[in-house]
Amino acid sequence: MKLYYAPGACSMADHIALHEAGLTFTHERVDLKTGKTEHGKDFTEINPKGYVPALELDGGELLTENVAILEWIGQQAPQLVAEGPLGRTRTLEKLAFVTSELHKNFAAFFGGASDDQKQKAADQLTKRFGQIAETIQGPFLFGDRFTVADAYLFVVSTWTDHFDLELPAKLQDFRQQVAQRPAVRKAMEHEGLLEKS
Ligand SMILES: N[C@@H](CCC(=O)N[C@@H](CS)C(=O)NCC(=O)O)C(=O)O
């Protein structure tokens, strides 16, 4: 199995989740500016959509879309999904919120949006980060159990550092807790975001 990723991008959620799941995988870095992988391949020949994450399964099938990949990892490692009869659906509910209400609003900052569009996106992000922060049971979204949704929320929360956006205190605490996890450190070290310990 191989994860196509870009350092610090949303694919880091999958990178973290794969380590948390204890799955064996390799990685190939994608340069999103040139569209080339670290082995010089044209990434659109692998994923025609041209974006990360993409996960090539052992049978050769390619999974794309962060929510689908994280959901699949959760199927392989049920300990990464919330407990209870509604656990899987509750996890998906959080993944959907992170992708459509948080991740999507960063597009204004990553792309060439106007100041007005950036301000609107920043206002939305403040509101939506505030809403999800209020649902954190602590230390993670669903209490003591770390799930694939925590991995994704952690990654998007790190993006606020680049754009001078402030996180609610509850999310700052959450970030600190998540950052200490060995799987998170391993993924971040590999992606060059942390000094190797
Ligand atoms: N709909 C996709 C979006 C993924 C996405 O936004 N990936 C970004 C990095 S976080 C990317 O690769 N952007 C480069 C591009 O779109 O060309 C998903 O949810 O997985």
Image: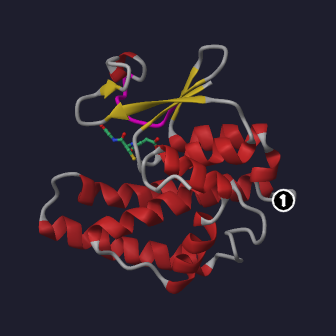
Secondary structure under the numbered disc 1 in the rendered image = loop
Residue most toward the left? Answer: 114
For the N terminus, the quadrant is top right
Q: Is residue 17 above or below residue 155?
A: above
Is residue 69 in the magenta section? no
Q: Please report the bounds of the magenta region as a residue range.
A: 48-54
- Residue 98 x, y percent position in the rendering: 51, 59
Residue at 51 percent of width and 50 percent of height: 189
Query: Three-letter amino acid code at disc 1?
Result: Glu
- Residue 162 x, y percent position in the rendering: 30, 65
Q: Is mark 1 within 8 Å of ligand 1?
A: no
Neighbours of disc 1 within 10 Å: few (<14), some (14-19), many (20+): some
- Residue 46 x, y percent position in the rendering: 42, 19
Q: Is residue 66 above or below residue 182?
A: above
- Residue 73 x, y percent position in the rendering: 69, 40
Residue most toward the front? Answer: 197
Which of these two is toward me, 145 or 38? 38
Q: Is residue 33 left or right of residue 143?
A: left
Give the residue at mark 1. 83
